[in-house]
Amino acid sequence: MLPLGIAPIAYGYILETFSAKRMLQVAVVALGLFEIAFALSEAYITLLSLRGLQGLLIPAILTSLMSYISARSTHANIQQAISTYIGITIIGGFLGRFLSGLLSDAFGWRFFFLVLGLGLLLVSLLLRNLASDAKPNFAKPKKKEILSVLKMPVNARIYGAMFGIFFVFQALLNFIPFELRTLGEGFEGTKTGFIYAGYAVGLVVSLGASRLIKWFGSQPRAMLFGSIIYLIAIQGFHFQSYEAMFGMMFVFCLGMFIVHAIASGYVNALASKHKGIANGLYISFYYGGGVELWGPSFQVLCMNMVGGIGFYMYSRL
């Protein structure tokens, strides 16, 4: 997770100079090869090193995708375009967790990474059919322009709030399998993966993001509503019951993805220029919140505090 929090800033800067399509193609091929290498490796240090390299490539893909979609969209439809993209990543997040559990039960943990690597190589062939994105700007932006994007009050609050919200989200998702084991009902593999079914609500939310904005009257109000749901849902995980956790996951993901789907599009709508930098900073703060430097137990203790900070920041937009 650490490279995911650092690398997007550099990629956002690079995308101001080079083609998002070209970076996307190269990164997907490289990630596919690293996934296959991961599946075939034995030594722990090799596995750890490959995960680090994957962490450097994933933000290149995410930043390129957001910049490509932003460049190919009009100002009128950019919010819905980015929200739809977020919806697809949500489905990918669920399928990754669910299928890894399912396939590891049947074939062992290595099989899923092999399938993932081959799938990425297949996708890389399809990327050749993408239309060219906006022409590269060969006049590199100055470093102070990165700071100027970050210093915009609205951007700073959104980035800070997303850091806190994903800090809580990642901690809870990582901690749940350990909590399920304490229930003593043999929750492994498929059973554990199925609890993430709440992700499905994220697709509905993302596709309906524009309607939510119209309903609440503005992006900040819609995001504030999502953060309220998010804070309430966190309290529901205190119940030591699989059924309660399973149901609460839908509410938890509902709040999370209302905020995420709208915030990502809002940042793009606000960025009249340097969209690559704006997207890179968004992804950096987002995934930076998931870096577990202190372990999941510390993050669980901070859940309500950080969630409250995120709520406050959205209330100030």
Image (cartoon, rainbow, N blue to C red):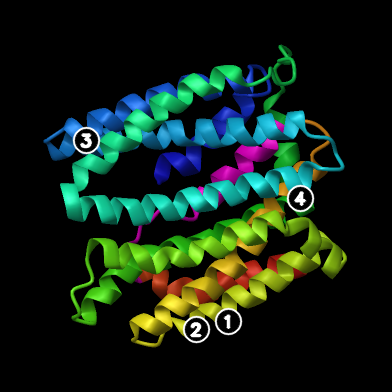
- Does the CB distance between marks 2 and 1 fall below 8 Å? yes
Q: Which residue is disc 3 drawn over?
A: 39
- The disc, 2 or 4, on the residue closer to the chain's N-terminal end is 2
Kindly state the secondary structure of the residue where label 1 is placed: helix
Image position of 104 with respect to 117: above or below: below
Task: Tell me, for residue 232, which label it has, or none.
Answer: 1
Kindly state the secondary structure of the residue where label 3 is placed: helix
Q: Nearer the viewer, mark 3 or mark 2?
A: 3
192 sits left or right of 76 in the view: left
Q: Quadrant of the C terminus?
A: bottom right
What amino acid is at disc 1?
Ile
What amino acid is at disc 2?
Gln
* Residue 286 in the image, given as x and y percentages of width and height: 55, 51
Q: CA distance from mark 2 to mark 4?
A: 28 Å
Q: Residue at x 49, y 83 (%)?
A: 235
Task: Tell me, for residue 235, which label it has, or none.
Answer: 2
* Residue 177 in the image, given as x and y percentages of width and height: 29, 68
Q: Residue at x 57, y 47 (%)?
A: 88
- The disc, 3 or 4, on the residue closer to the chain's N-terminal end is 3
134 sits left or right of 20 in the view: right
- Residue numbers of the magenta segment: 274-297
Quarter of the figure with residue 48: top left
Q: CA distance from mark 1 to mark 3?
A: 39 Å
Quarter of the figure with residue 300: bottom left
What amino acid is at disc 3?
Ala
43 sits left or right of 261 in the view: left
Task: Tell me, for residue 266, which label it has, or none.
Answer: 4
Image position of 28 with respect to 186: above or below: above
